[in-house]
Amino acid sequence: MRTTLSIFFILLSIASRSQSTLIDSIITKESLQFTISALAHDSMKGRLTGTREAKNAADFIAQRFKMAGLRPLARNDNYFAWYPFESETDALAGNAINVWGAIKGMISPDTFVIFCAHYDHIGIDHRRIVSFGKDSVYNGANDNASGVALLIELAKYYAALKTNRYTLIFIAFSGEELGLLGSAYTASHVDQSYIHALVNFDMVGRSINRNIKKCMVIAKRSKPIIKKLNAEIYPQKGFFIADMFPAQNLFTRSDQYSFNQVENNFFLTTSSALDDYYHTLKDEFNTIDFDFLLLVAKNAALGCKIVIK
């Protein structure tokens, strides 16, 4: 019996080290930094939906999806899924863009798991443009370039892992800041009964505060999800926690809320509207805690295996 147990624990240790080596080689701080530096750059002018800069951001994300190993869906315009949008500019001729990529399921390809994050932000402060030398760009590094960066790292990891039972769809939504427009349009044009689970990432680049380096699970019923997520990242128990700000109704304020028919529906965040830089000009690249974001990304990748297998 002792010999059998010894062999079991040796094999378990080898498997654990192999998994750790794979995730460490794929999900990196440098990759997270690259994505956020591009999306939160001043040249993106705050990625307001319907602008040329939002299209530039969509182009960048599509390229990152391609490099990650995701394939476009046949019904879309390559990686783009356009939807009608009344813009104050004529940049996109009344259309906005969600960016889609997929990994085909190994066993049940007609059932889907959606991972998503919004890439849009709130644009620029026109009042400050006329003041020479004053910052006027709402860069949105945490809100939500950080979520998109995490989304891309998960895509890379799951594409390399090749163990997904279901077809995995990765979506970078636009229009979230204007009322969940991109996700609402998608949710109304898909049969949600085919969606096994949906996981959203929003504002994951800074910790809740200096003392709480955790990730909140926001869901209608979060306790069973938290238990399962934490079980997947053993021995780092307790990394995923319940909503610390229930009065803010966070579940209704991000893209997963559009998919109300999906039972396994939750989002991960490490922040809230109480964040010092939330929707301010100071939400910039240098405010992101990349060591913490790297931890969130790795734990999310490991934990979210519960919905893909």
Image: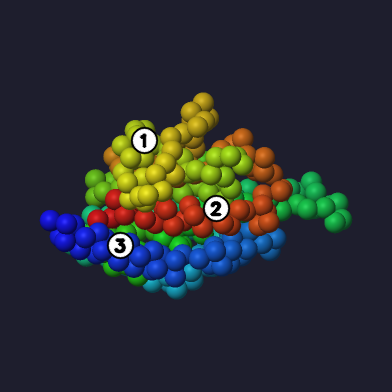
Give the camera-side residue of 14 and 212: 14
Give the residue at mark 1: 222
Residue sitting at the far left: 1
Q: Cβ–Cβ below 8 Å for labels 1 and 3?
A: no
Tag on residue 292? 2
Give the residue at mark 3: 13
Kind of element beneath mark 1: loop
Residue sitting at the far right: 132
| Identity of the residue drawn at 33% across and 40% down | 227
Kind of element beneath mark 3: helix
Give, as a three-letter code, the residue at label 2.
Answer: Phe
Q: Quadrant of residue 104?
A: bottom left
Label 3 or label 2, whichever comes before in sequence order: 3
Locate the N terminus and report the quarter of the image it occupies.
bottom left
| Identity of the residue drawn at 26% across and 48% down | 196
Kind of element beneath mark 2: helix
| Identity of the residue drawn at 38% across and 68% down | 22
Locate the C terminus and report the quarter of the image it occupies.
bottom left
Label 1 or label 3, whichever comes before in sequence order: 3
In this rendering, position of residue 195 left or right of residue 142: left
In this rendering, position of residue 250 left or right of residue 206: left
In this rendering, the label closer to the viewer, 1 or 3:
3
